[in-house]
Image (cartoon, helix red, strand yellow):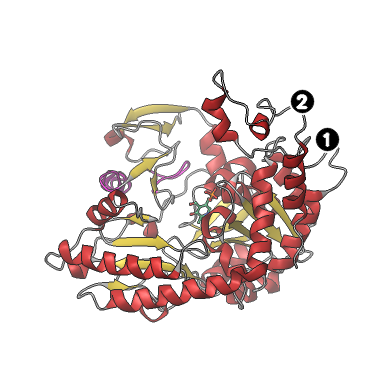
Amino acid sequence: MSRTPLVDAWRRALAARRRPMQVPGHKMRYAEGAAGWSYDLVGDLVRDDVPLQGGVDDNAYSNKYLDQAEALWAQSVGADHSRFLVGGSSQGNIAALATVGDEGVPIAIDRTSHRSTQAGLVLIGARPVWIYPRLHPEFHLPIGMEAASLTAVADQVNGFFATSPSYIGTVSDVASLVAATRPRKEPLIIDQAWGAHLDFLPEGGAMRAGADFMVTSVHKALLGYSQTAVVSMRGDLIPTSTLDRWVDLTTTTSPSGTLLATIDGTRAAMERGGAERLALIIEAVAEARRRLARVRGLVVLDDAVAGCRVDPAKLTLILPGTGADGVVLGEALWQLGHGPESADHDTLVFTTTVADEPEWVLEFADLLAALIESHRGEARPSSPLAVWRVEPEVVLTPREAFLRGRRRVPMREAIGEVSAEQFCPYPPGVPLLAPGERVTQESIDAIHAASRVCRVAYCSDPTLETMLIVDSA
Ligand SMILES: Cc1ncc(COP(=O)(O)O)c(C=O)c1O
């Protein structure tokens, strides 16, 4: 039976019913059922919160429960070293990039990667050399990074960063990316935020394919508490202590032992029958794909349609041939309690996990087929999201642009200037325009078009009437 050092220690801490004369401020009074005053406004929300320090472990971390749990995770995913994170894969991406990059150092980065990579670049001052996944010729969706894209820039860069799986579930052939980077001994980071479950499939995830660093969100595709993620590394290109330094720099000094223990518990759950359960869900998704493929005009993304591997737990639908509008369907699904992972006019993305039941997946597929029929319209040409094909003119590094003076101008007057901020449609959280990039008519049109479909996040003026540009004066 797989060990669970953090989970066990967490349970003991809960059962101990201590009266701590230290943090947490809520004093873990939920354990004695405290009620009255206004505690009950918060008590339910902090129920089960045990800090790592002075809770799950003692103040000096004498028992090293976290270290033990991290070592078990590393062993499980084929890594030499893993660190648990409470700042999501966002923190993992920042820490991994900072580990391989430095001020002015060029790094090849997938321009369809998550906004957190830009945060990493701001922190360390590295210079992005943007690379792009292949786009599907008909649907204009990312279908995996190719080794040739890395090889093409290999003599200009000191590291590589690629995202796999993509938001829509397409998976890159990581082994071929490793083969492309290996001769130069420059590290390869794979953002596998959406594919934590892949590590528990027989073929394994990015670590087993030979990547040097891998970031996975435990809260997305597995069972972890929201915010939980892991950054893992293998090999000896960079010492593990360098990763530790950046993880420690970017994290809280008061992590929740509860959150961390859910990572430990998730790993053990996957080792104790979770992988078999995942196989059942994957079977159900395959059957759901078959049923949905019978809907006239609907394209269901699978390996054959995409021309690359597709995450077997993801359900991604391409709608234009049905005439149905994904935004309208997404809203209807939200009302029904089946919120989609993402919905734009053309595409619906659904995430299934080991916490689903196979029969729910099938019921959902039938409901979805009926919903699409009831919203059927004239087949239309596709109108793909602009985020998958942004090719910016990089004028300044993200760090230079972030730290320089800035001024606010009406959006239409910003054309030709350098953006000082990020415009990021959510989902998928890939910036349309980022600090340091030239503002163009095309970028402004894309931002306004995105705002009609979803939230454009992280810009300072949510009305999108003005924006901050780098003040070159
Ligand atoms: C590809 C990718 N990487 C990283 C992240 C950040 O993950 P987290 O929300 O765990 O910080 C996301 C979030 O959606 C993502 O899509």
Q: Does 111 sit left or right of 369 as displayed?
A: right
Choose top left, top right, bottom left or bottom right for residue 15.
Answer: top right
**Residue situated furthest right in the rendering:** 62
Please tell me whether residue 21 is drawn above or below residue 359 in the rendered image: above
Q: Does 256 sit left or right of 131 as displayed?
A: right
Q: Does 58 sit left or right of 113 as displayed?
A: right
Residue pointed to by mark 2: 22
Instruction: Give the residue drawn at x 30%, y 32%.
Output: 463
In the image shown, does 473 or 382 lie closer to the viewer? 382
Please tell me whether residue 9 is drawn above or below residue 145 in the rendered image: above
Secondary structure state at the residue bearing disc 2: loop
Please tell me whether residue 216 is drawn above or below residue 183 in the rendered image: above
Instruction: Give the residue drawn at x 25%, y 68%.
Output: 369
Residue 341 percent coordinates (x, y): 39, 56
Instruction: Give the residue drawn at x 30%, y 77%.
Output: 291
Asked if the stretch drawn in magenta spans residue 446, the answer is yes
On whether ligand 1 comes within 8 Å of the CB at mark 1, the answer is no
Mark 1 / mark 2, whichever is N-terminal: 2
Q: Does 10 sit left or right of 301 as displayed?
A: right
**Residue situated furthest left in the rendering:** 378
Q: Amino acid at mark 2?
A: Gln
Residue 157 showing in the rendered view? no
Instruction: Give the residue drawn at x 76%, y 51%.
Output: 8
Residue 321 percent coordinates (x, y): 20, 70
Secondary structure state at the residue bearing disc 1: loop
- Crowding at dot 2, Cα within 10 Å, few <14 / some 14-19 / many 20+, comes out as few
Residue pointed to by mark 1: 59
Q: Amino acid at mark 1?
A: Asn
Query: Which quadrant of the rendered structure holds the C terminus?
Result: top left
> Would you say the residues marked 1 and 2 are in contact, meaning their CB atoms lie under 8 Å apart?
yes
Q: Which residues are magenta?
A: 432-453
